[in-house]
Image (tube, rainbow, N blue to C red):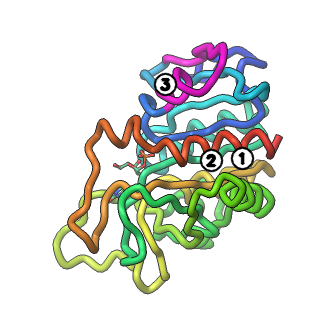
Amino acid sequence: MTPHNQAQPGEIAPIVLMPGDPLRAKYIAEHYLDDAVCFNTVRNMFGYTGTYKGTRISVMGSGMGMPSIGIYSYELYTTYHVEAIIRIGSCGAYSPDLHTFDILAADSCWSPSTYAQAQSGDTRDIQYPDQNLLHTIEMTAQQLNIPLHIGRLHSSDVFYYEEGINNGAAEHNCMAVEMESFALFHNADITHKKAACLCTVSDSFVYDEDTTPQQRETSFQDMMKLALEAARKAI
Ligand SMILES: O=P(O)(O)O[C@H]1O[C@H](CO)[C@@H](O)[C@H]1O
Ligand SMILES: O=c1cc[nH]c(=O)[nH]1
């Protein structure tokens, strides 16, 4: 159907949970979805559709960085008629208020990336999630008793900065860094669809705290449950 996704029309649900790691997508499908069917294996960017408490939900990896989520989310919105994407990522904490395994939802993201400008001429360096979807996530977190930090993400094109480089995040009040929300929110905006971003803190720039690749793949259970429950309500 597209150069990157072999799913046939109708095989993807109107709402998609999107981790960067395709193996996190596989884990969620295998542990949380009933009757999960794999709809994509192109480039091992696994995607599955199943039901969660009776609601049809898809989960698919985005890969790392804006070009990658830019491709997959654009195809989901335009070719597969997906209405909403909730990114479920990992992030590095800048704020001393955040520790590993804390969960945050972006109320905005700042990025010096050229993604939006190159894609559509949009020169804004701050992009926003869908307000209703964010509200649903906040309400769901309260109902599930899952503590949720709300704030601004730094959406970065770079994972490994050279020593001494000021990446601008502090001046823009970013509480944590990840690498995809800016392109996702932009694509949702230009296609008139919905997006939100949840992240679990995988490491800290303040404290000596980190998680293993295995933990990043399988252990973000509260974020998975929160995203699934919010997705059920958002549809
Ligand atoms: O764990 P995911 O969802 O991939 O998110 C974060 O992890 C990757 C970097 O390690 C980047 O994709 C970043 O955004
Ligand atoms: O982009 C990311 C994601 C997790 N941790 C980081 O330091 N950066």
Circle 3 Cα neighbour tier, 10 Å, few/some/many (<14 / 14–19 / ≥20): many
Which disc is residue 226 wearing?
2
Instruction: Please say if the residues under marks 1 and 2 sit with CB atoms less than 8 Å apart.
Output: yes
Point 40% across, 82% down: residue: 170
Q: Which residue is mark 3?
A: 26
In x, y percent, where is residue 89? 48, 49
Which image quarter is the C terminus in? Answer: top right
Point 62% across, 47% down: residue: 226
Mark toward the viewer: 3 or 1:
1
**Disc 2 to disc 3, C-alpha distance:** 17 Å
Which image quarter is the N terminus in? Answer: top right
Say left or right for 213 vs 142.
Answer: left
Of the pair 54 and 60, the residue shown nearer to us = 54
In x, y percent, where is residue 194? 75, 50
Please determine whether, in this image, residue 44 is positioned above or below residue 62: above
Q: Quadrant of residue 106?
A: bottom right
Of the pair 135 and 31, the residue shown nearer to us = 31
Q: Which residues are magenta?
A: 25-41
Q: Earlier in the sequence, mark 2 or mark 3?
A: 3
